Amino acid sequence: MKCRALAPSGLLGVVLSAAALLLAGCGGGGGDSPASASMSGATLLAGTEVSAVSGFDTTLVSAPADGSYICAPTTLEVRGSGIRNVELLPPGSYTPKHATFTVSEDGTSAHVVFDPRNFPNGDLQVRISAFNAAAGQPAEEIVVMPARTWKIANDTWPCASPGSSTAFTAELISAPAADSYVCHMLTLEVRGTRLRNVELLPAEGYAPKYGTFTVSDDGKIARLQFDARTFPNGDYRFRISAFDAPAGQPANEIVVMPERTWRIANNSFPCLPPGGVEPPLPFKAQVTSAPENGSYVCSMVTLEVVGSRIKNVELLPPEGFAPKYGSFTVAVDERVARLQFDPRKFPNGDLRVRISAFDAPAGQPATEVIAMPERTWRIANDIWPCLSPGSTTAGNPGT
């Protein structure tokens, strides 16, 4: 239910507006027909009366549900028309003001990042109110979100321990295939939510620990530079496990990469050093990291192609070879190529792309392998859904 009121400024305005909200029935029941009431200059308008009179209307787009645990910063968003001020407030008061939204110049949207770390643990009762005038000025008010209770649990259960109601997820993004020869340093990558620790381990057990991933502050990305030269030659059976608590603490485990055998062959076939006599490998290429078809691309993302005898890799339109959207950096051993794709360099809208690999440098006759057939990526710089939670944003690259 939306509640609308004319909110005078000053202490009198606080008292009158609170009384007006009670008369309007905010937070409790409601009739079938619009109602109005007036009290010492505070006017309540219900239904569509405010919109008809002033063109002021709002809709809640994004906010945690009533009773939710808030375990990480989350974006609150309101949309509508005639918006000049939006505030996160207690249910029955205008103080303390928990947050002030950033309102677009055209008054059609407002958002704020709510950070639970700014609040003590416990139940926090809040409402969201929108106004058609700047703070401190007489304004009509719409209670966009009636009272909800959010549960703050910083660094305590369920926000920081196994069994949390906030999903702990993990998936493997990049790692050598089973039975691969690992001939050079490469990046292992895991993505998910609430990652606290990721380890490269034996197929069974937890020792020896072959590597500990570096986990991003937001717990969504973990990477490890795996250097085959630190291992003696031979076959190794590895797994990759992710945990939702730091090393040494009780935790849930997700085996993101079940057992794979990697073959270490430093300075021997097929991992000879430069200048070694190596039988020619076939030219091949496949994409290992790129946004999925139909994804919104909201931030810089790494595109990766792996294979053999790769000399040139390009990001191109689905047909033809121009314009060239990007040229990959190819490793010296011609097995890996990467490109940092920045959506800010492209206008908003659908971008149709393919990734092609070549066995000769650019401008020379070459065999082409289409490592990634046509995909459509949706560029939405600084607009929805790249500014609100719950969007189908890229940043979870797929193969």
Image (cartoon, helix red, strand yellow):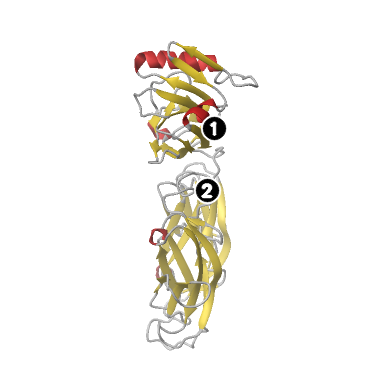
Residue annotated with mark 2: 391
Which residue is more in the foreground, 303 or 316? 316
Instruction: State yes or no: discs 2 and 1 in contact (Cβ < 8 Å).
Output: no
**Mark 1 residue element:** loop
Residue at 49% over, 13% down: 38
- At label 1, the amino acid type is Ser
Residue 276: percent from left, percent from top:
40, 86
Image vertical order of residue 272 relative to residue 253, above or below: below
Q: Is residue 120 visible?
A: yes
Q: Quadrant of residue 108?
A: top left
Q: Quadrant of the N terminus?
A: top right
Residue at 44% over, 16% down: 42
Mark number, residue 68: 1
Residue 239: percent from left, percent from top:
54, 59
Spatial separation of the CA atoms under disc 2 and disc 1: 19 Å
Would you say 13 lies left or right of 21 here?
left
Q: Quadrant of the C terminus?
A: bottom right
Graded by Cα atoms within 10 Å as few (under 14), some (14 to 19) or many (20 or more), the crowding at tag 1 reads: some
Which residue is more in the foreground, 328 or 49? 49
Residue 139: percent from left, percent from top:
41, 24
Graded by Cα atoms within 10 Å as few (under 14), some (14 to 19) or many (20 or more), the crowding at tag 2 reads: few
Would you say 273 lies left or right of 49 here?
left
Residue 154: percent from left, percent from top:
44, 33
Looking at the image, is mark 2 or mark 1 earlier in the sequence?
Answer: 1
Among all residues in the image, which is located at the extreme right?
Answer: 32
- At label 2, the amino acid type is Ser
Image vertical order of residue 272 relative to residue 296, above or below: below
Would you say 343 lies left or right of 44 here?
left
Residue at 41% over, 41% down: 106
Image vertical order of residue 251 relative to residue 334, above or below: above
Among all residues in the image, which is located at the extreme top?
Answer: 40
**Mark 2 residue element:** loop
